[in-house]
Amino acid sequence: MKPRVLVTRHVYPAAVAILQEDCIADYRDTYDVMDEAALVKRLRLAKGVVCQLTDPLTAAVIEQCPELRVISQVAVGHDNIDVAAATARKIVVTNTPGVLTEATADLTFALLLAAARRLPTAERFLRDGKWQRWDVDLLCGHDVHERTLGIVGFGRIGQAVARRARGFSMRVLYSSRTPAAPEVEQELGAQRVPLDLLLKQSDYVSLHVPLREETRHMIGVEQLCQMKRSAFLINTSRGPVVDENALVAALEEGLIAGAGLDVFEHEPRVHPGLLEHPGVVLLPHVGSAVTSVRSLMCALAARDCAAVLRGERPQHPVNPEVLG
């Protein structure tokens, strides 16, 4: 008998077709999110689940699903999944890295430019009928060309952002646990420095780290105070990497010039202080929101889920120790 796989929410059709080749797909073609109780009820007899960042795959949920063998996440991040609990139960967890690198890097640079040049403010000014004439200092923003970009986290996406920065003749600093290969540093013109030096010297600080215990609130009061008053903070990684209360205070006190944010500490809730500040560009977590990319992410999650249930090694295991 084919194994049962729960697809928790709406996905692109290719993913369901892939699953149906080897599995019985229990597909919830809806945007509604299940709470833990509803998820357990639907998942209890399933061998696999294709899930999204909104799904609470907690230790309590995992414990109540004895048949579960694989959790396939349609995302790179997996902080909604208790990976340790899954690993203890020998459940494989997979994600979808790589395919969204270029789209997220594009979005990062779009946020940087929008924040620096005050584009949302300028558009609202025009749409509200306030544009009456050209003035020499009308909606003036900040330079990007030949300024310093500090990249925190220098994996695939961080390096892709650095590659775009070269087109703007920017000086690129980066901070990471491990150095990039010398040839990568040379290609991208990037210099590895300690985080505190990066914060002090950068005109734009862009965050590209995964959410772990050591990265939660890695940008807080102390770090924001080290930044230039003319600097901008860009975050397309995970919301809790930034202490939002500290960020709002820094913006209100003029410690930094502005921010561009695609992710938030308590999504989908956004801190009121961010909503009210004119120097902040806000987006609803759309870093990988390109049709081709999202479709590929769904298909990749489905393939890895089916592979595990066939007894094969998935392409992107988060906890490879389970596979032996």
Image (cartoon, rainbow, N blue to C red):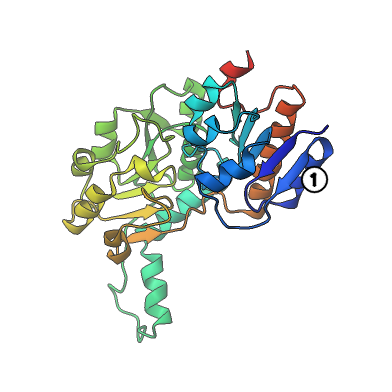
Q: Residues within 10 Å of mark 1 (few under 14, many from 20)?
A: some
Frontmost residue, 206 versus 116: 206
Q: Does the rendering let one see residue 98?
A: no
Q: What residue is at 43 percent from the left and 52 percent from the top?
A: 262
Give the residue at the far top of this rendering.
324
> What is the quadrant of residue 240 in the picture?
top left
Q: What residue is at 76 percent from the left and 33 percent from the top?
A: 3
Q: Position of residue 219 (x, y in %)?
A: 28, 40
Q: Position of residue 78 (x, y in %)?
A: 51, 36
Frontmost residue, 190 versus 59: 59
Frontmost residue, 6 versus 310: 6
Report the amino acid beneath label 1. Answer: Ala
Q: The C terminus appears in which quarter of the rendering? A: top right
In the picture of the structure, the residue carrying the numbered disc 1 is: 17
In what element is the residue under mark 1?
Answer: helix
Q: Say above or below: 126 vs 48.
A: below
Q: Does the rendering let one see residue 248?
A: yes
What count of labels does the image hold? 1
Judge left or right: residue 32 versus residue 138: right
Judge left or right: residue 164 versus residue 281: right
Q: The N terminus appears in which quarter of the rendering? A: top right
> What is the quadrant of residue 199 in the picture?
top left
Q: What residue is at 63 percent from the left and 51 percent from the top?
A: 9
Q: Say above or below: 323 vs 42.
A: above
Q: Position of residue 82 (x, y in %)?
A: 48, 32
Q: Say above or below: 135 vs 54.
A: below
Q: What residue is at 23 percent from the left and 39 percent from the top?
A: 223
Q: Position of residue 110 (x, y in %)?
A: 47, 55
